[in-house]
Amino acid sequence: MSSQSPVTRIGIVGTGMISRCLARLISRHYDDMTVTRVLTRRPIATVTDYPLTEALTQSVADLIDHCDLLVECSGDPYHGTEIIERAFEAGIKVVTINAELQVTTGSYLAGKGFLTEAEGDQPGSLAALHEEAVQMGFKPLVYGNMKGYLNHNPTPEDMAYWSARQGTSVDQTTSFTDGTKVQIEQVVVGNNYGATITRQGLEGLNSTNLQDSANILAQMAEQLGQPIVDYVIPSGYSAGGVFVVGRHDEDQAGAIEYFKLGKGPYYVLVRPFHLCSLEVGKTLRRVIAGGKILLNNSTTPTLSVAAIMKKPMAAGDVIERGIGGYSVRGEAVKIAECPDHLPIGLLKHSVLKRALEPGQIVTFDDVELTPSRALDIVLQQHREAIHRQLLETQLSESAWNASADLAPVALPKAVGAVLS
């Protein structure tokens, strides 16, 4: 009998940059895994740049039947939600590289099966750094992201240029640039660790010295009596990583200073890189070995990402897409304080019922939403989150009435076996 370990069959959802890089990594460097199926909605004959064309399929059933572990990296909350539910029905664990999905339907899905975000993108990198920090005895106060560039209202021309230059989609490039992505990432981290925010949209400190900025954020966290999530915009140092700010035992201060981490009381642990698809394999091996969830949006979220208008729009105008579009951008909010906000991940071909101005938060009452499984899930989980928080904080009855006015959407759970 061979003593060789079994090879885990990996299914991937999506054929973008993350998927392509991950497929190359596994096929060239991982003897304990093999990519067996890759789900695409594009005509297979047109996906000529994928490294494993023989693995491509348009059938969800084919994908599910030929994998032991699923990686969801489509970047589409609607599509990803449907596929993950199918995977859970088959008893398959799911690893996401899709913070957009996590913040939209992830809390519901986390209660239905094994769902974890992967190490590599900023949320997973922060989770890995958190685990290291806690094992070393640090008490995290701040979970920090680094933002290289921010323009709340970029032009389509600029986004097309940078998309082509960076090899990412225009939608992704836009969400990175207008700040939506960093808001999404930090909300997922906050929900996973029970952290909060100091204000809508986060602080986003302009920073020439990370320790100085970390001190400010840590003091804010201690004033709130709760860890926070936030980000900095570095100038003069690299913006490629993540950081955790924490305290340690006072009688360890001398040793920590000797170890070159400063005098304290706030210590900054920095992970100066996040290598996206190249790090996903660490999470796959963690799951295969029976390890616990790295992080997800939690089943009891307190934070969400609202859609904020970028430009004036009239009744009848269409918001083609929320995340990565030119009509709205995302900002982190406390669910209990904005009970009627529309999570940005739900905006897709949505028609405005009334005129809206720049800076306004889009609410459920402002738009006609396309019925979907994702919408049904979000309405349910938002009611539950609002109810829970209102009971805990005894907020006003008027806020609860605002959430109760949301009409339920009854939708079938079934998803077609073949997506085009």
Image: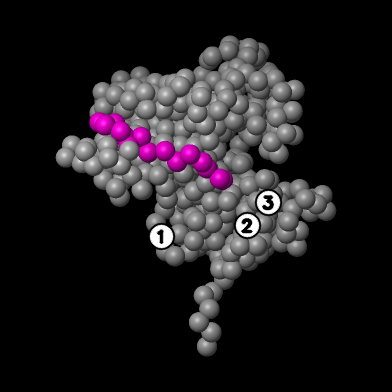
**For the residue labelled by badge 3, is the local secondary structure a helix, a strand or a loop?**
helix
Give the residue drawn at x 26%, y 31%. Answer: 264
Question: Which residue lies most toward the front here?
Answer: 258
Q: Above or below — where is 58 with respect to 339? A: below
* Residue kind at label 1, given as amino acid type: Gly
Q: Which of marks 2 and 1 is nearer the N terminus?
A: 2
Neighbour class for label 1 at 10 Å: few (<14), some, many (≥20)? few
Nearest to N terminus: mark 3 or mark 1: 3
* Furthest residue in direction right, as rendered: 45
Which residue is depicted at the point 58% across and 11% down?
Answer: 357
The residue that mark 3 highlights is 20
Name the residue beneath numbered marker 1: 291
Image coordinates for residue 243, horizontal then vertical, percent = 41, 36
Q: Name the residue under label 2.
A: 25
Closest to the observer: 47 or 207? 207
Secondary structure at badge 2 equals: helix
Under circle 1, the secondary element is loop
- Closer to us: mark 2 or mark 1? 2
* Residue 383 against residue 419 in the figure, above or below: above
Residue 101: percent from the left, percent from the top? Answer: 54, 41
On the question of residue 348 being in view, the answer is no
How far apart, in angstroms, are the residues tagged by discs 3 and 1?
26 Å
**Residue at x 71% of width, y 39% of height:** 167
Q: Left or right of 420: which side holds 202?
A: left
Residue 58 relative to residue 295: left or right: right
Q: What stretch is highlighted in magenta?
A: 261-276
Tell which circle, 3 or 2, labels the residue nearer the N-terminal end: 3
**Predominant secondary structure, magenta span:** loop
Q: Nearer the viewer, mark 3 or mark 2?
A: 2
Task: Name the image quarter holding residue 198.
Answer: top left
